[in-house]
Image (cartoon, helix red, strand yellow):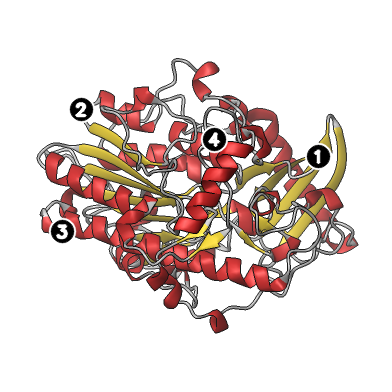
Amino acid sequence: MANPIRPSQSSWKKCWLPVFFFGLFSIVHSETPQKPNVLFIGVDDLRPALGCYGDKLAITPHLDALARRGTVFTNAYCQVASCHPSRTSILTGLRVKTTGVRGNRDGSFRKRLSEHVPLPQHFKNNGWFTRAFGKVYHVQDPQSWSTRKFLPKAEFGYPIYGNPVTLELQKTIRATHKPQDWWGYQKGRNDKWAKASSWEDPDVSDEVLFDGQVATAVIESLRKNKSRPFFLAPGFFRPHLPFVAPRKYFEKHPKSSFQLPANRSLPKNVPSFAHYNSAESRSYTDISRSGNIPEAKQLELLRGYYASVSYVDTQIGRVLKELDTLGIADRTIVVVWSDHGYHFGEHGTWNKYTNFEEATRSTLIVSAPGQAQTGSHSKGVVEMLDIYPTLCELAGLNIPSSLEGQSFAKLLDQPCLPGKSAAFSQASPGKALGRTLRTYNYRYTRWTKGEETLAEELYHHQTDPGENENLVPKAEHQKLLQQLREQFDAHWQKDS
């Protein structure tokens, strides 16, 4: 039987390994005395719905162009399919057990790790100018930045909607509902994010909305700081709900283009508590609190998601174009990352908060000056908490010994090398805790309540990439299952 942890070694040997000139050096080496810039671009809720990932519905020319200058990571996994814990893990380079941040209602990691230096602060401490724009952290961390973050403003809270009617509804909701009535949010932090319509296509310019304003602010900062090393972190809000983008982006995606996924039921042999009830979508006024979401509404959401992705792609393109205009692209490391994936109705759910592939698989594209191969796709398994040590290596910074991630910088030069043996994620969509292990070929998930194991899942991704049949009950997989159990136990006892 093939090794369940890594792809066969013969598959890696088919790749050309350009090590003659580059293999012994980091991509940004001491021969370049100037510190490289870092553009750390976060995109909220972006599953790999991009042309460079092979998505035929996506219209993403700017991110596809970036991919041609860098490396697309096709097996990158978050540590929790939820904004706050995932972003905390990415920015600290630590696992969930260490940060103590398991859900969106938890506070800052600083309460538990007051002395830990997160990624942007590490760059700041070593001479980089750092600034955040939009949504980077979920709970703010002023110590990370050289100056106050940029946050778009509008008449009624943040510029989420564009139509006057929706804006008035948003205003009414804010005035008549308590913040805790809006699903999943804490009073005093997100009480401006009113939940009116789940999608909207206002006939407005790009800069009326949140992400257009973020792009403009980043461009202004690039012009101002082009002569000194910078770590700029644009945090784009789309394609997070509500799916709002200027009308022209909806027009790029006709309604007839979309159809719902075929696997809209839970996998065979899977417990009900693995299911998430799309609660985030149900917090909007045009979606019922219970029952099935009508297929017509789901198709509207799908179209809104892709329109939002196209809108954000354009904003990122504006920023990347400015790097070229200013003549600093060749000394700027660009990372495009998402905090987690997203469900389009697969397994009967929308949004995230599950341990399935759709929720845990994230978007990750890296372009670094001087990398030996460009326009490549790496299939090696990486975790999102690996970004921190990777950027340190690329920028020539020391990697803090406290980090729990591992640098994947070598995959930029040699994309056909294997990555990690496995990635680890967790979620609690119901009353049980689910923790999952994803190797190149398999996913193994264990559900527990206290010390009791309630259920297990096993999927073979080479034969069942949609994770539609749990193989745990089948006798022929028991040896493999035991092997994965042992790997799972070794990790979670130490690092979970």
- Numbered badge on residue 432: 1
Which of pointers 4 and 3 indicates the residue nearer the eye? Answer: 4
Amino acid at circle 3: Asp
Amino acid tagged 2: Gly
Residue 127's mark? 2
The residue type indicated by label 1 comes to Ala
Which residue corresponds to the image point at 38% horizontal and 32% vertical from the top-left? 119
Q: Do the residues labelled 1 and 4 touch (CB within 8 Å)?
A: no
Q: Mark 3 points at which residue?
A: 324
Identify the residue at horizontal 32%, vertical 60% (top origin): 206
Q: Which of marks 1 and 4 is nearer the N terminus?
A: 4
Residue 112 higher or lower than 337, as above or below: above
| Residue at the disc numbered 4 | 191
The quarter of the picture where the N terminus appears is: bottom right
Residues at circles 4 and 3 in contact by the CB criterion of under 8 Å: no
Residue 26 on image: x %, y %: 27, 45
Q: In this view, does 487 lie above or below 321?
A: above
Quarter of the rendering occupied by the C terminus: top right
**Residue 414 x %, y %:** 37, 58
Q: Distance between the residues labelled 3 and 1?
A: 49 Å
Foreground mark, 4 or 2, reads 4
